Image (tube, rainbow, N blue to C red):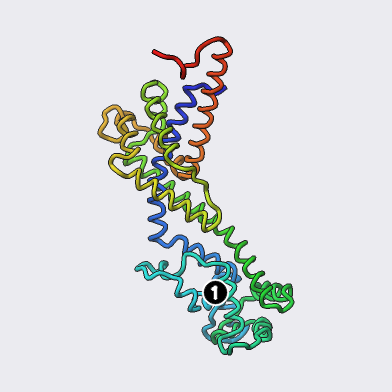
Amino acid sequence: MLDNTVLEVVIGLTFIYLLYSLLGTLLQEIVATNIGLRARLLQYAIRRMLNDQTRKKDKIAIIKKHGVPEPTLLSEAFYGHPLIKYLASDGWWPLQKIPAYISKETFSKVMVDLLRGCELQPGDVYNALITKSLNDGKIAWTDHSFICTQTLSYLKSLWIDAQGDVVKFKMLLEQWFEEMMERTTGWYKKCTQLVLLVIGVGMAAVFNIDTVKIVKKLEHSPKLRAQVVAQANDYAKAHPQVADGQTPAASQKVRDSLYNQAAEVVKGDGDVAKVNELLGLGWDNKDNTDGTTWLGWLLTALAISLGAPFWFDLLNKLMKLRSSTATKKDDTQTKAGEIPATQRVG
């Protein structure tokens, strides 16, 4: 069975990591929003889907094949479509002028629009126009817009699988887009984890959060350990469990919950201030300014880089483990003829 002291030290450390991870997550979201990280990765994913190589190499290949001076790639025509342009915000940063999120329905509609062209009337059948665009290797939406060889082959295969049915073709395009977005989600998590690591290093240095010293303080001070565990228990009860959402809607729900918790944390009377006071974190406390180690800072930064959802989930599991351990201990004492500590008077 896990020693009670060790469990409480782990709970206290997890709670501290959670609080600072909330701050780090908030800062990471601010950075990601202002540099257009989601928009950048989405644009990169679209280019991976609709281009064969880099834009420069693809344009050189098209110039050699079709003999046009300045060709437009399919990905460029995609982002030039009015629907995509109107999804972007009006921020000052260039990457804020492209959308950070595109639905699968929007992707399929824009792709069909590009292939069929805009010279249509209501009620017109445009299956033949899509077939012509795929056979010619260029889109009908704008002049001198060409489809790269490998992308063209894949679009043809989807059109064949759909048997020339536009509705089925859209479904296959949406499936293709969803598969690519799953990979993009993985790329985004890796990028945000790197940003969190950098933020974690900065936070560890600014607040002097030394993991090694925190463990020593919690280990050698039962009173301090009990206070921090009590804070962690109150926090876990006050906040619903947060899971790391995979779908856009779930991810938005997670972000909103984390924002709300982070807003509470940054208040002057929040949990961070209380824990810092208990542990003497920061540079003002004399006991915490001597012998500062880079190892302690690095461990803190690595912990913060795991993100708030990870530590929140771990804290809930540890609190349940502590509760079950205490219950088993009381049951054992009762069987031995002792009165449980929770029922003793005086």
Name the residue rendered at 64%, 82% in the picture.
137
For mark 1, give the secondary structure: helix
Location of residue 167 in the rendering, given as x and y in whole percent from the top left corner:
66, 75
Q: Is residue 43 above or below residue 138?
A: above
Return the residue at label 1.
Answer: 75
Quadrant holding the C terminus: top left
Location of residue 65 in the rendering, given as x and y in whole percent from the top left corner:
63, 83
Name the residue rendered at 50%, 78% in the picture.
81
Q: Is residue 170 above or below residue 210?
A: below
Front residue of this view, candidates 106 and 94: 106
Image quadrant of residue 20?
top left
Name the residue rendered at 54%, 82% in the picture.
71
Name the residue rendered at 37%, 71% in the picture.
90
Location of residue 95 in the rendering, given as x and y in whole percent from the top left corner:
42, 67
Image quadrant of residue 150?
bottom right
Say whether residue 226 is left or right of residue 115.
left
The kind of residue on which mark 1 rests is Ser
Say whether residue 206 is left or right of residue 87.
left
Q: Is residue 345 above or below residue 38?
A: above
Location of residue 188 in the rendering, given as x and y in whole percent from the top left corner:
51, 56
Total labels drawn: 1
Image quadrant of residue 225?
top left
Front residue of this view, candidates 150 and 162: 162
